[in-house]
Image (cartoon, helix red, strand yellow):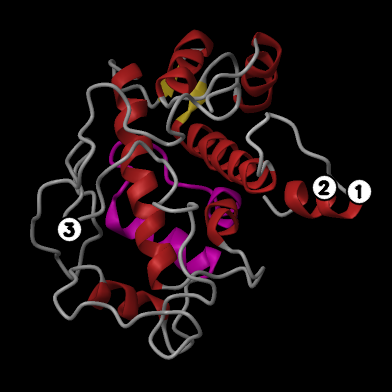
Amino acid sequence: MAYPGYGGPQYGGPMPGMPAQGMPMQGMPMQGMPGGPMGGPMPGHMGGPMGGAPPQGGYSAYGGGYPGTYGAPPPAANDPMWSYFTAIAGQDGEIDAEELQRCLTQSGFTGSYSPFSLETCRIMIAMLDRDFTGKMGFTEFKDLFTALNGWKQNFMMFDQDRSGTVEPREMTQAVNAMGYRVSPQALNAIIQRYNKGGRIFFDDYVACCVKLRALTETFRRRDTMHQGSVTFQYDDFILCTMAI
């Protein structure tokens, strides 16, 4: 059932004009991060739906994604992301917010746009961190870059002058293009929350996308009857909203 907040018939479906399947396969440079110059497709098979949830519920198997952890299938030997992940994850086999920020900054993923703040990196991890460890494993790492690649391409569609910002009306169009159907009041609250001097920067745009996806997923998991309404216990509400 499609209703406000779920973004149409398939939440997280591909944005108009974007491929529904994976991005073209390319080599994975060990010194660089997927993404390369601003606007280029990410190597590997991280492309796909517009920053949407992964298939079948939107989350990877509980327990991380690193070999030996609970619920984590071993990665494919030829997966172009695996070697890169192990290089930045360190001995604990997971990535925290500071490691993710360094990884994204050093790789030049944002191109000419400003690097991601530590706070945005924290909520990126929180979006996929179902056991509240503040870290993510290999499966979550790949899911994140699927979303980031889609969000970047969406942002670039509206940032045609490559200023690194979009206007409030363009932000509204971007939210709609991702399939979200929210009220004008909710859109206005989003604009007021994430604009700086009347413009929305790429870092704030991604932070907004992360929160939209995470909160919508939280709501959808509880709306088992697909009626567009759920009942929260107070502590559950605080947990769901404060974790992002």
- Please, is residue 232 above or below residue 26 in the view? above
Q: In the image, which disc is placed on residue 126?
A: none
Q: Which residue is mark 1?
A: 234
Give the amino acid at mark 1: Tyr
Give the amino acid at mark 2: Phe
Give the amino acid at mark 3: Gly
Q: In the image, which disc is placed on residue 44?
A: 3
Q: Position of residue 194 (x, y in %)?
A: 61, 27
Instruction: Tell which circle, 3 or 2, labels the residue nearer the N-terminal end.
Output: 3
Kindly report which numbered mark, 1 or 3, lies closer to the viewer in this rendering: 1
Q: Hey, which quadrant is residue 102 in on the image?
A: bottom left
With 4 as the anchor, is 36 left or right in this view?
Answer: left
Element at label 1 = helix
Q: Disc 3 versus disc 2: distance between alpha carbons?
A: 37 Å
Q: Disc 1 versus disc 3: distance between alpha carbons?
A: 42 Å
Q: Position of residue 132 (x, y in %)?
A: 67, 68
Residue for point 8% across, 56% down: 26
Kindly report which numbered mark, 3 or 2, lies closer to the viewer in this rendering: 2
Instruction: Tell which circle, 1 or 3, labels the residue nearer the N-terminal end.
Output: 3
The answer to whether the residue labelled 2 contacts the one labelled 1, judged by CB atoms less than 8 Å apart, is yes
Q: Hey, which quadrant is residue 182 in on the image?
A: top right
- The stretch in magenta equals 96-122
Q: Which residue is mark 2?
A: 237
With 119 as the anchor, is 171 left or right in this view?
Answer: left
Choose between 202 and 154: the one closer to the eye. Answer: 154
Residue for point 44% across, 33% down: 202
Quarter the N terminus occupies: top right
With 76 as the anchor, is 215 left or right in this view?
Answer: right
